[in-house]
Image (spheres, rainbow, N blue to C red):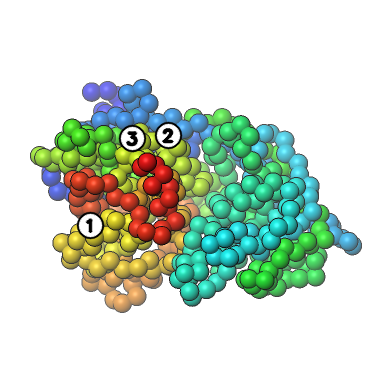
Amino acid sequence: MNRYLLLFITPAILAQSGDISGEHIRAHVKFLSSDLMEGRGVGTRGERLATEYLATQFALVGAKPAGDRGTYFQRVPMVGASTQPSATLSATGANKTVSFKLLDDYVGVSELQQPADQFEGDAIFVGHGITAPEFKWDDFKGVDVKDKVLVLFTNEPPSDDPKFFGGKALTYYGRWTYKYEEGARRGAKAVFIIHTTATAGYDYEVVRSSWGKEDPQLKLASGQPALAFAGWLSKDAGDKLAAMAGKTVDDLLKAANSRDFRPIPLGIRIRGNIPTRIRQIESRNVVATIPGSDPNLASEAVVFSAHWDHLGIGPPVSGDSIYNGAVDNATGCAMLIELARAWAELEHKPRRSAIFVAVTAEEAGMRGSEYYAEHPIIPLEKTALDLNFDGFFPFGRTKDLETTGAERTTVWPVVQEAARRMEVTIKPDAHPEQGHYYRSDHFSFAHAGVPAFSINQGTDYYGKPAGYGEKIFDEYNDKHYHQPSDEYHDDWDFAGMEQVAHFGFIIGTTVANQDKLPTWRAGDEFLQAREKSLK
């Protein structure tokens, strides 16, 4: 037994049981979210410790290495970009110049992956920054924005019509990642998102804590477009900028929500001096497998995923600078280990193989899962399904579960049958406006064509009053999400995580034994990518 096995053995993992155990999950959450892990920041000592722990636990439960060169690790080459405190940003109009303060007024980072970055360009407001022909929506309307500084809102035009941008449910067009990608594709110099709590779904402190640190970026490919600055403006800073054009943030948002919207040159020139600390990072996904039993299907696989990273060490809050990430996402990683153990202990293994992948850099925009989807261990056309686990509350079992996106796949009958067997109700996404489907690692698989969704807890807790689930969600989102206070406590109840893992286990083993590979339902946005991969 190597030294890492000796270091990371936990009492829970030594207990051999064919049943999924909440207490096993507890032991892993407690360790992965301890201060020893230093918040599991990408490219840090905390990454090394956390990924070694995950690899060791996969080895202990009997899952084989599936990474590079016979190891449990898939190398993910990255560049860490940190905007330095000396960065400056200003806007000049006809009669005045306004300066903005880093962190308080704006946050962001250069995507050019070079130490010195200056940009200057005319500001143009482009609404929500969306071009969606299928919805007959175009915020650019033929206007050339090359070398311009784009100012826009996240989210989408509001609607109750489910056939128009998903109605109240956010689509990928509404995600901040899309805004930057679209700006880069069009040759913009920089993109600034004006933050409002209503359009973002969280307050500016979440943006500040998430973006006020090093940004781990996948290395730019040759010729790949990138922004000189991808950033956010606070609501107050947005109002200052809008006032220079004789408008308010509310005026701009109202205009953006109209189908008749056309880009608005603001008559402002924005200048940025963004000194950037560049660090080469060799991060890693942790990948393990359990081979299938059918010689004809073992080359295909069901994937279980969760992200291991959190925010590392950051600005202190009430004297605490370690962003432990207990809920987000030590919980999902712990469940991944327990799922691997349960699968390995099956006397009769499913026909298809199982892959367990703990990915890096989700907090930076799902970059670890993006890398895996571009460099899969098993080809995507042979990947049956991705089941993702991300962020679970330790408050017990629920009468309902959420599987947003499952209804879009041919796996949906399997999900419904699993719910019947476990006597739970599948409820729709409690917060469709948050766009959770496009905010977690399953999306990287879906975008590449693989049927994929996350399994989440519901809100109807056993033994709790009506509204309890909504209350704890709001409390976590307001007080603990991406804050140092997301910490483990000994009085946590892990029965709900045991329930969710069991549910995912049923779905995964069922799909692993089916004759045909799953796909997307007719008309789904990801069906074309799936059909292309299967040809």
The residue that disc 3 covers is 378
At 31% from the left and 39% from the top, the residue drawn is 382
Left or right of 302? Residue 473 is: right
Q: Is residue 111 above or below residue 480?
A: above
In which quadrant of the rendered view does residue 217 lie?
top right
At 24% from the left and 68% from the top, the residue drawn is 425
Left or right of 228? Residue 135 is: left
Question: In the rendered structure, which amino acid carries the disc numbered 2?
Answer: His
Marker disc for residue 22 = none
Give neighbour class at mark 2: few <14, some 14-19, many 20+ (Cα, 10 Å). Answer: few
Q: Secondary structure at mark 1?
A: helix
The residue that disc 2 covers is 375
At 42% from the left and 34% from the top, the residue drawn is 375
Question: In the rendered structure, which amino acid carries the disc numbered 3?
Answer: Ile
Q: CA distance from mark 1 to mark 3?
A: 23 Å
The residue that disc 1 covers is 414
